[in-house]
Amino acid sequence: MSRSPAVVAVPPAIGPLGRLWRQVKARLRPAPIDTAEALRAFLEERAAFMAQKCAIDYCRGKTGLASYALFTEKPFLDALDVCRWETFAAVLGDLLILVETHLRPHVAAGQHAGLCEALIGLYSTASATLPAPMQREGSRDEAKDAFALRLKAASLGRPQQALDVADHSAKRLFDTLPIHISMREMDEEPVYGAVRFRMIAVNQELQQRL
């Protein structure tokens, strides 16, 4: 008597819609930030993006059709590099102050100073990923020292929120934009608003993933 062949369940092939759905789910539910290395990578990426996006969007919007020629001029590009570096260093520090706010409730008694030292070390490591421009060769140590003072002061007060720190980064961006002050003096509020908007968005993502 013949036996029926065994039926083996074969999972259906994942089509284009299936792959798209997986990508959507990955964006809606990104991986948690559960290691120091993952936190460093997140902060580096977001700080670099904010610094570049805010600076370049402003310069292109301000100069319009002339921006094509402007972005070929070496003096402008050198000044833009300084702006990006200064803003990156500021945003990185502000994001780490927000990290301290999120982690503070979970730190054991007597360990808060250790958390601050760890965040200062993370700042030092992360800030090294973006080379400082030649005009700012000594600025990395200065930025680290300034951040350490800000973090320690913030850690002694009430927990900081995105709007509490955003104007620090916005001021650094505005002060170093490679557009003459006479042409941008009326644009302070839009520049600050752009940084505040992005700082709030990054902080929300940070809170969800930490």
Image (spheres, rainbow, N blue to C red):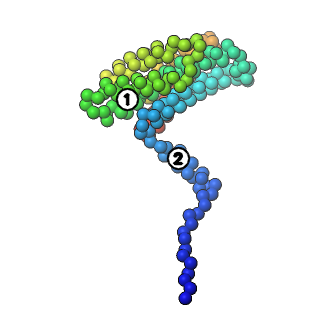
Extreme-front residue of the structure = 1
- Against 16, residue 12 (above or below) is below
Q: Amino acid at mark 1?
A: Glu
Q: Considering only vertical position in the picture, is 41 above or below 140?
A: below
Q: Contact (CB < 8 A) between labels 1 and 2?
A: no
Mark 2 highlights which residue?
Answer: 26
The image quadrant of residue 55 is top right
Q: Judge whether residue 113 can be spotted in this image.
A: yes
> Residue at point 51% right, 14% down?
139
Residue type, numbered disc 2: Ala
Task: Out of 134 and 92, give the one closest to the viewer.
Answer: 134
Q: Position of residue 33 (x, y in %)?
A: 44, 39
Which residue is drawn at the image coordinates 41% and 39% (left, top)?
34
Q: From the top left corner, tell me how far across and down residue 199 is, in percent.
A: 49, 29
**Image point 45% across, 34% down: which residue?**
37
- Give residue 10's position: percent from left, percent from top: 56, 66
Instruction: Report the residue marked by disc 1.
Output: 100
